[in-house]
Image (tube, grey):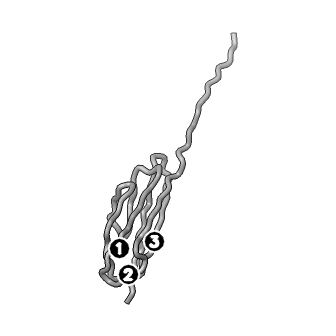
Amino acid sequence: AGGTSEQSVTVTALPLPTVSLTANPLAVTSGQPITVTWSSQGAIACVGTGVATKLATSGTVIATRSATSTFAVRCGNAAGGTAEKSVTVTVLN
């Protein structure tokens, strides 16, 4: 006696995370405070350059710079998907 068996499997793909990053102001004099703010959707962890290395999935830091600098944040989700944003702040002479 032969028979067939069928199974159904549903696979749900996680959407890629999204990241928002701003720096204010975008042009400063040396030593002037810069407010760097980021947030993410669908991320479980974030890392940064120009700000602390390990970051929460959203936050704000105050930074000062003596030279033009780029701040970047990269966030990832549980499936390994990543999103990255960067912003450059110009230090005026």
**Badges 3 and 1: C-beta atoms under 8 Å apart?**
no
Please say if 20 is above or below 31.
above
Q: Nearer the viewer, mark 3 or mark 1?
A: 1
Residue at the farthest bottom position:
93
The amino acid beneath tag 1 is Ile
Crowd around label 1: few <14 · some 14–19 · many ≥20 (10 Å) = some
Please name the residue shown 58% across and 33% down the image. 10
Q: What is the secondary structure assignment of the residue under circle 2?
A: strand
The amino acid beneath tag 3 is Val
Label 3 vs label 1: CA separation? 12 Å
Residue 51 pos. (x, y %): 34, 67
Please name the residue shown 44% across and 55% down the image. 40
Please say if 33 is above or below 92.
above
Residue at the farthest right position:
2
Residue 54 pos. (x, y %): 33, 59
Q: Kindly identify which residue carries mark 3.
A: 87
**68 horizontally vs 80: left or right:** left
**Badges 1 and 2: C-beta atoms under 8 Å apart?**
yes
Q: Kindly identify which residue carries mark 2.
A: 28
Q: Quarter-wise, where is residue 29 in the image?
A: bottom left
N-terminal label among 3 and 2: 2
Q: Quarter-wise, where is residue 74 in the image?
A: bottom left
Q: Kindly identify which residue carries mark 1.
A: 34
